[in-house]
Image: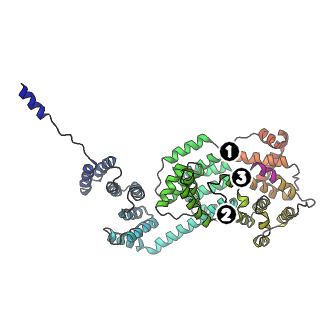
Amino acid sequence: MSKDSKARKQKGKLLTFIPTGEYYFAKGLKAYHRRDFHKAKKYLQRALQLEPGEPMISCQLAIVWTELGEYENSNRILHHILEELDEEMVECHYFLANNYAHMGFFKDAFHHAKLYMELDPDGDFSEDTEDLLDVLTLEADDIEDEMYEEDDLIAKQEQARDLLESGYFQKAIEMLNSVIDEYPEYWSAYNNLALAYFYLGEAERAEEILADVLERNQGNMHALCNLLVFAHYRKETESVDHFVSVLKKINPITTEHQFKLGATFALVGEYELAYQWLKKLYKRGFDGEGPFYYWLSYASYHIGQESFARRLWEKVLEINPDKEGFEPWNDEKSSMHGFEDHLGSIFQKLESDYLEERLFALFLISVSDKKESILSSKQFGENEKFTRVEHDYLHFLKTGQRKPNLPIADIHETAEILYTYHQPVGTVEAGLFLMWFSVFAESIKSGMAFQNKNAWAAAIEYVWTKLRGEKVSQKEAAERYGISSATIGKYVKLVNSFLQ
């Protein structure tokens, strides 16, 4: 009995088999060579679960995704390898070039193909890469035309973005509308157009544009980012949390989308998320413009990477010296600066084709720490766009003397009242002042009196706030400026009549 028992115990000793990542990787390779790509994907995904940091498994899975025609999934893995796992695995650039070529993104395909040849000219895929480059240049004229067209589009987009950042909203709107007329499905232009209208105070129109984008191009990331920006400026906490949670789940592939996502997170104070995306771009050698280094510096500083933030800020000032005083570690000083101390932005507005923007620029000069140097500059004295209105305003600023039958002093003093509540003048506040000077520009021929300055200021602020979708009552605005509810009601009607 005991012998039988012993025998049974010996027979019961089984070796436990625990499959490893290597085991599933081998099975995945076998399935791949049999061209059973669905089974290969299954095995390689299991291998990656067991060994998530192994770049060889990741790369093979990316190749399988390519064979299945899932180029975006493949690219996501390949970028992850180069950014997080093994930046020296240069064959990933060849695979990326191949994927982008299949997707029709020839510029990106050129970039990665050439990068592979630079990094590994005698590598295993060098001949294939040369063949790929030959294919990409076979229709060289057509490709170059497409690339030039794309470059022209990007240049216009960058110019419009610069105009937005300088508070030059009307000109940006003109440019963006012309781009949309020529390229009706260029969604980025719609998104920046929405920003321009939002900064002008036309929040409803801005949101209509974004709703149209999301209806015609579902999941458009730029539109979602801009809705987050709108909610942030309105201090709508629940909406901010909602859009942050939505955008956290997005894993964009393109450089443009990664930068947009990172910059948006930085703008709304989500610095950890911002740093995650912007630092990835930095590690890949992304040579962005001033805004890239600006937001990466801010994100870095606010997560404790101060020395890195300071190095980046040197680059910011090299590109845009006007940013001096806006350092992330100098919050007190930064909070005291806005467009009123941006010489480049002021001079740009002085050259505007719109009277309200030239008047706005003159007001900014009046409250600027650099007032004297601007007024004495040669560039200021040679402005040929000034009409009698601007010359009258300039005379008042220089002498403080009022000319008979001209309301320019009242216009200026109303703007000063607004400035006591809305300073420094940032991108959002600029819309308020532009609205005020637009009302004046429209009223010049009517002989309108502007003597009740507090009433005009209250009405302008109320209309601007309502247009931006914020909750405010006429009673609250009236109390803020020391006037009656009846008075503000009268002036709100006047403001609306001039804005129609």
Q: CA distance from mark 2 to mark 3?
A: 19 Å
Q: Secondary structure at mark 3?
A: helix
Rendered position, 458 above or below 308:
above
Dot 1 alpha-carbon crowd within 10 angstroms: few under 14, some 14 to 19, many 20 or more: some
Q: Which is in the foreground here, disc 1 or disc 3?
A: 3
Q: CA distance from mark 1 to mark 2?
A: 32 Å
Residue where numbered disc 3 is placed: 429
Location of residue 265 in the rendering, given as x and y in whole percent from the top left corner: 56, 50
Query: Image quadrant for the N terminus?
Result: top left
Q: Nearer the viewer, residue 424 or 258?
A: 424
Q: Secondary structure at mark 1?
A: loop
> Quadrant of the rendered structure where residue 85 is?
bottom left
Residue 496 visible in image = no
Location of residue 36 in the rendering, given as x and y in whole percent from the top left corner: 26, 53
Position of residue 273 in the picture relative to residue 31 (left or right):
right
Q: Amino acid at mark 1?
A: Gly
Q: Which mark is residue 322?
A: 2
Residue drawn at the location 48% of the way across and 64% of the way down = 285
- Please provide the residue range marked out in magenta: 416-429
Residue 425 visible in image = yes
Q: Amino acid at mark 2?
A: Asp
Q: Nearer the viewer, residue 79 or 104?
A: 79
Location of residue 454 in the rendering, given as x and y in whole percent from the top left corner: 84, 47
Position of residue 253 in the picture relative to residue 232 (left or right):
left
Q: Which mark is residue 469?
A: 1
Q: What scheme was used to colour the molecule?
A: rainbow
Location of residue 128 in the rendering, given as x and y in whole percent from the top left corner: 33, 69
**Do residues under tags 2 and 3 come within 8 Å of each other at their CB atoms?**
no
Residue drawn at the location 24% of the way across and 53% of the way down = 26
Most common secondary structure along the magenta stretch? helix
